[in-house]
């Protein structure tokens, strides 16, 4: 071991002397970067169509595959939400919408949006595409496992979608799948529907684990020379922390899925107590429904941050690039991401204040939940302080970032209402909750996803998206979605419970009929606006303005590849060498208002750089 | 410019909506006005933060819009500002959390003079059990529920003999007398929720959960199930009547006790059959069930 170290040191010295002699002076080399410790990875280069585009091991292609599959599920989820809003806004108008189908749509919409769209898109989509590029690697460290990861996800989606076509239909147990009702008659799809859901979730977790290990190990082990952890773009920090959370949280979902499958198929009683149905006791005995809720939310709460943290990271980078300013308080941002991630494992039971768990838990979980508000608020301050004294380009990307800040602050604050245990009592299980989580983990992350697509589309395709269509898309989506969810909070104040197929004629609920109609109309418009976006994608793919290299004048590595769009292996002959963090915008003394991460200090001698 | 104005309009619109909204909570009819107060406090603090943060953002949009050739400020960190903001946020969070915890503490400590009421939930309806003159509910178990013993009472427990059965969706409560709701379920999760009382809790099969409140306004209130419990969840309504002592006692006298129920039951086979039918769920939902033929 010590011998090896000595050899390494010798090598370093050699390189040092070499380069300093090359510069022709006796002083220390300011461009010195530690040499690589590992040899470069051999990549499998596919040649046929199948190995290049279908069973492909290139993380970029896998990222696109993930994105397209996730977006497909998202469209299904969107259509389901339209049908739900038809029923809620205009009951009786659509006779084919029975209570049964309504609950099936509620369930599938929720699960699809949270797991199959948001998680898969942020980690599988953006993670795969961006991690190797942003840390300066040629690919993920385990490309083969990465390929399997996508195909497991694909099979999981197929299994999920097939539940629409089995007898009894998909499960209608609510996306939380609470037993006992999830597997008992009386809930739609309690036969094949729930089984397929549980199998699909299990496949998803297995597939994700293969991808997740890849993301974590690539970030830890395959960073290029000079890319220290504290130089990584916040996108990578967000995806990294979220992946660690997912690797720790998804097993809880997997075991609860397996246990519930056993309860359903073999008649075990993990979650099933004595149950009287139609006057007869079923064969179950002694299980605990609350145990499932603990397991589910032990996964479910980190899941919120699995979606939120990559969004936090990505939006930080977008704001920084497009306001031409360094991200404010980078180190604070990193620690806030890590801190939020760690804390997110100690707050899960705030979903269960009125679940019948020991009421003493309320004190603990309310306190931890409100503690998490502090680092989250700091991130918000840092975003707006990044805008402050910047040079803000108001383009589609920035618009989506601004939309994100507003919706996220709004949804974050209502989260403080719900996390504060006594305030949660009147509001839990009402439309206030629906409004809160759609604002904070529906609209806000979607704003980031759209912003990110407008930002990175030129990298992926070499062409810019249409700005005019983009602005139309943004304003309809943002204003429409805000007018769906902002008023919806007030339905919760009235006391309207969630998951009600029909409100009937309770006096305080009939006062909400007008609002329900308004919300439904807004939902139809917002959904339709997404087709502007799809049109923009298709159109710009062929006819968009050629982007050229680094159209946004960004600093991070993904824009510095020799080819645009980047090819397999990313970097051509030589890996890039990193000399600085990704946020040197507007550095005094520098020629341009941005200094890419690969620019060595000797090229910008006059720049008064503070942090590198 | 346009962008800044629209964002400003969104902020102002939100404030106006909040101030003028015709949709606000129903008149409170219990002792939990402290919950409403904490919500109002949260609105002031949270709303204040929302307005300040978003207005600052709008200011930045106006003030620092892109100008060719202008350089943004280069200042990676500002320790003092960051520390100040951390403390300010912490104070705000504590100001929200502390009252919340106090109210929760009251919520989980039931006053000694509370009347115990058992709420028994099933797919899809409610029934109730009140203690007799001894003021105590008899012990029970779902495992021994039968037609002769619809609440699964422990027949060896003397406290249960005079328990009052209310086999209907309608429950009466005394005004200004705290009531401890003991929740049971025979099948799946349910939640006994009356918006006017502000309070709620899940009913979990296999265990008994509780919460308490003190109704302080006479009237009829609708009970809603607030935990998804299957296809007729939305139809699982009940009724609570809050009234003065006279009418309450009159209602109470009309109800059956466990012992009178057992005696009557022995003699009347026909009635027994009817009970089974009631247990077999409301007939209007049976058609929905029949479609569910897979299992």
Image (cartoon, rainbow, N blue to C red):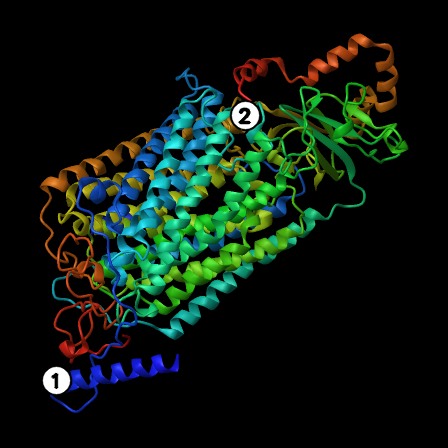
Q: Position of residue A394 (x, y in %)?
A: 20, 53
Residue furthest to the top in view is: B270
Residue bearing the label numbered 2:
A187
| Residues behind callouts 1 and 2 on a single chain | yes
Count the numbered circles shown: 2
Q: Would you identify the image quadrant in which residue A391 lies? A: bottom left
Left or right of A141 on screen, residue B68: left
Q: Residues within 10 Å of mark 1 (few under 14, many from 20)?
A: few
Q: Is residue B5 visible?
A: no
Which one is in front, A455 or A139? A139
- In the rendered view, tell whether residue A18 sits above or below residue A63: below
Q: Is residue A561 above or below residue A527?
A: below
Which tag is nearer the camera, tag 1 or tag 2? 1
Which residue position is annotated with label 1? A23
- From the viewer's side, name the closer residue of B285 and A418: B285
Mark 1 residue element: helix
């Amino acid at each position: 071991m010590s011998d090896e170290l000595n050899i390494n040191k010798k090598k370093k010295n050699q390189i040092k002397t070499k380069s300093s002699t090359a510069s022709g002076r006796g002083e220390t080399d300011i461009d010195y970067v530690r040499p690589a410790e590992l040899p470069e990875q051999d990549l499998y280069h596919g040649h046929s169509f199948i190995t290049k585009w279908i069973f492909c091991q290139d993380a970029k292609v896998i990222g696109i595959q993930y994105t397209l599959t996730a977006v497909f599920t998202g469209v299904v989820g969107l259509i389901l939400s339209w049908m739900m809003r038809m029923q809620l806004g205009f009951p009786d108008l659509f006779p084919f919408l029975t209570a049964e189908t309504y609950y099936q749509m509620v369930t599938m919409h929720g699960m699809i949006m949270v797991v199959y769209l948001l998680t898969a898109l942020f980690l599988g989509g953006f993670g795969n595409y961006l991690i190797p590029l942003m840390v300066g690697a040629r690919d993920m460290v385990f490309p083969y496992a990465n390929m399997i990861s996508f195909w497991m996800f694909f099979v999981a989606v197929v299994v999920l979608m097939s539940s629409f076509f089995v007898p009894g239909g998909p499960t209608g147990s609510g996306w939380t799948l609470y037993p006992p009702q999830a597997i008992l008659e009386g809930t739609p799809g309690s036969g094949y529907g729930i089984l397929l859901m549980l199998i699909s979730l299990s496949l998803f977790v297995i597939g994700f684990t293969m991808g997740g290990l890849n993301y974590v190990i690539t970030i830890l082990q395959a960073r290029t020379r000079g890319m220290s952890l504290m130089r990584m773009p916040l996108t990578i920090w967000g995806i990294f922390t979220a992946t660690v959370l997912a690797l720790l949280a998804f097993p809880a979902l997997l075991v609860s899925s397996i246990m519930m499958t056993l309860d359903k198929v073999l008649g075990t009683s993990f979650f099933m107590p004595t149950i009287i149905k139609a006057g007869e006791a079923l064969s179950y005995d002694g299980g605990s429904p609350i145990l499932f809720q603990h397991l589910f939310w032990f996964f479910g709460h980190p899941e919120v941050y699995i979606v939120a943290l990559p969004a936090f990271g990505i939006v930080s980078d977008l704001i920084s690039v497009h306001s031409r300013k360094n991200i404010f308080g980078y180190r604070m941002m990193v620690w806030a991401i890590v801190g939020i991630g760690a804390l997110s494992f100690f707050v899960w039971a705030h979903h269960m204040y009125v679940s019948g768990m020991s009421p003493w838990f309320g004190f603990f979980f309310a306190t931890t939940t409100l503690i998490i508000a502090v680092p989250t608020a700091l991130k918000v301050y840092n975003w707006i302080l990044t805008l402050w004294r910047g040079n803000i380009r108001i383009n589609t990307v920035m618009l989506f970032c601004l939309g994100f800040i507003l919706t996220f602050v709004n949804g974050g604050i209502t989260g403080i209402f719900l996390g504060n245990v006594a305030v949660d009592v009147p509001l839990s299980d009402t439309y206030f909750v629906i409004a809160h989580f759609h604002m904070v983990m529906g609209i806000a992350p979607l704003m980031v996803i759209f912003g990110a697509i407008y930002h990175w589309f030129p990298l992926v395709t070499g062409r810019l998206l249409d700005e005019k269509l983009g602005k139309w898309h943004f304003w309809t989506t943002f204003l429409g979605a805000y007018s769906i969810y902002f008023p919806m909070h007030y339905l919760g104040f009235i006391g309207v419970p969630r998951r009600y197929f029909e409100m009937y004629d309770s006096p305080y609920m009939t006062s909400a009929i007008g609002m329900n109609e308004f919300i439904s109309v807004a939902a139809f418009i917002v959904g339709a606006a997404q087709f502007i976006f799809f049109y923009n994608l298709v159109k710009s793919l062929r006819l968009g303005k050629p982007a050229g290299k680094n159209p946004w004048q960004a600093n991070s590595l993904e824009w510095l590849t020799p080819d645009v769009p980047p090819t397999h292996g990313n970097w051509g002959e030589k890996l890039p060498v990193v000399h600085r963090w990704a946020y040197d915008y507007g550095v005094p003394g520098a020629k341009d208002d941005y200094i890419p991460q690969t620019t060595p200090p000797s090229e910008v001698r006059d720049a008064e750089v503070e942090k590198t | 410019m346009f962008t800044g104005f629209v964002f400003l309009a969104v902020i102002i619109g939100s404030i106006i909506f909040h101030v003028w909204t015709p949709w606000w909570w129903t008149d409170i009819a219990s002792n939990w006005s402290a919950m409403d107060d904490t919500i109002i406090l949260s609105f002031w603090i949270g709303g204040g933060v929302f307005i300040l943060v978003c207005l600052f953002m709008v200011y930045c949009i106006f003030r620092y819009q892109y100008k060719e050739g202008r350089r943004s400020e280069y200042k990676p960190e500002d320790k003092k500002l960051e520390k100040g903001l951390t403390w300010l946020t912490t104070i705000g969070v504590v100001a929200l959390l502390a009252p919340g915890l106090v109210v929760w503490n009251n919520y989980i400590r039931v006053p000694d003079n509370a009347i115990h009421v058992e709420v028994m939930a099933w797919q899809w309806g409610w029934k109730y059990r009140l203690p007799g003159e001894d003021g105590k509910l008899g012990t029970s178990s779902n495992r021994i529920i039968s037609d002769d013993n619809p609440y699964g009472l422990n027949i060896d427990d003397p406290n249960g003999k005079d328990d009052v059965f209310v086999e209907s969706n309608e429950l009466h409560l005394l005004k200004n007398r705290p009531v401890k709701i003991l929740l049971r379920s025979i099948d799946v999760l349910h939640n006994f929720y009356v918006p006017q009382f502000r309070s709620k809790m899940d009913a979990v099969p296999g265990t008994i959960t509780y919460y308490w409140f003190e109704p302080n306004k006479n009237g009829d209130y609708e009970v809603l199930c607030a935990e998804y419990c299957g296809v007729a969840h939305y139809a699982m309504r009940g009724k609570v009547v809050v009234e003065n002592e006279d009418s309450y006692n009159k209602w109470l006298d009309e109800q059956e006790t466990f012992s009178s129920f057992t005696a009557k039951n022995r003699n009347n086979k026909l009635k027994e059959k009817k009970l089974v039918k009631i247990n077999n769920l409301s007939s209007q939902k049976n058609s929905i069930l029949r479609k569910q033929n897979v299992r």
